Amino acid sequence: MLNVDAGGADRVALAVLAQYRMAATEQMHLVIAPGVRIEQTRRRLAKLREEGLVDRITLPQAGRTRVWFATQYGVDVVSEWPELREWRPPRLASDRTAARLRVGHALVVTETGLAFLQDARRRGDVCRPLDWIPEVYHPLGGGEAVIPDALLYYRTSVDGEGGSMLRAFVEVDRATMGPERLAAKLSAYARLHDYVPTPVGRPRPRGADPLPEESWRRRYARFPRLLFVLDGTGPTGIEARIRALYAATTEVAGLRGLLSAVPVLAAPLVDILRDGPSAPVWRPIQDPEQRVSWMGHYRPPVASAEHTALERVQPWPAVAPWGSGS
């Protein structure tokens, strides 16, 4: 029984690659085995490829970077594992052409997750490789859904114990759409924040059961924070996108519930990679002149009900204790 978990490292590598969708060799190494030589990670990926569990494409325009993804066989293998209980297999998972066409966005999402993972390691916080979950499906009814680029689980530590649990929806924007379309994503998250599923069947007698509640409460103790990571453009483009998000807070109806209860922050990816996600590189979209940490308690002004003025509201509740979620 001493070697019963001899395949544990292979299992972690396959689970990460399936969940992250795509990752370059160096990204995989930093996620799963930063303490060993990268040659060990290369050999592990080559072994998984020989077994038909993963495949790769090569990017000639990026120094022949190898980018890995799980094959359909690999997806089938991991689909029943308990550690991937919130994971939905991607469509066309094993299609090399589809992989080539989506590689740009997928690698930036992986790089963003890696930044949070490495920051947690430096700080002594807890964020495991599988705590970064791309494309978690959140239904809105009628066949519609909100699917963030990633869902992040993160626990802060206090002197090595205790700490607080944070969750965040992460949207990675590479400037492939206009600033107004980026800002329109706020409406989708506002709908998710307020969405109550319609009960199926006959009306229930009054008092027979509790009133229906928002669907997100079945999954989270508190609605996750919303983080916009901005890439693919220079400082002027970044500023335009943040200003578009700010304008939406005063011009788009239906956002008040979300904005009054949930931290919504934006930051350039270049700043996140340089200083770390925990640094004050994030700009609250309701008060973009501020610079805060994504883990902070600050709440910026919220647009009034008439969307004609800004007003101060009470601070966000303190970060929830471990186990309650935030």
Image: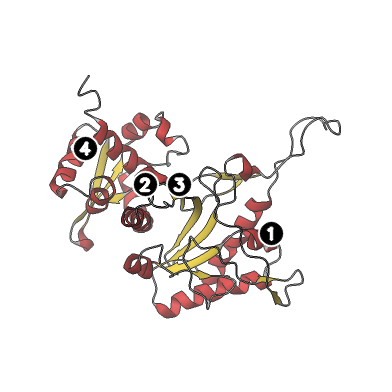
x then y, percent, for residue 286: 60, 71
Disc 3/disc 2 C-alpha distance (Å): 28 Å
What's the mark number on residue 20?
Answer: 2
Residue assigned mark 1? 257
Q: What's the distance in space between the residues labelled 2 and 4, CA to CA? A: 17 Å
| Mark positioned earlier in the residue sequence (3 or 2) | 2
Could you tell me the amino acid type at mark 2?
Answer: Tyr
For the residues labelled 3 and 4, say whether their Cβ atoms are less than 8 Å apart: no
Going 23% across and 46% down the picture, which residue do you hit?
33
| Closer to the camera in the image, 45 or 209 | 209
Report, in whole angstroms, how far the alpha carbon at label 3 lies from the one at label 1: 31 Å
Q: Are marks 1 and 4 in contact (CB under 8 Å)?
A: no
Task: Identify the residue at image location x=36%, y=32%.
Answer: 78
Counting residues from the N terminus, which is met first, the one under dot 2 or under dot 4? 2
Q: Which residue is mark 3?
A: 162
Residue lying at the far front of the rendered structure: 159
> How many other residues sit within 10 Å of disc 1, few (<14), some (14-19) or many (≥20)?
few
Circle 2 crowding by C-alpha within 10 Å: few under 14, some 14–19, many from 20: many
Q: From the top left corner, tell me how far across and down residue 116 is, in percent.
A: 38, 56
User: What type is the residue that disc 1 sits on?
Assistant: Gly
Q: Earlier in the sequence, mark 3 or mark 4?
A: 4
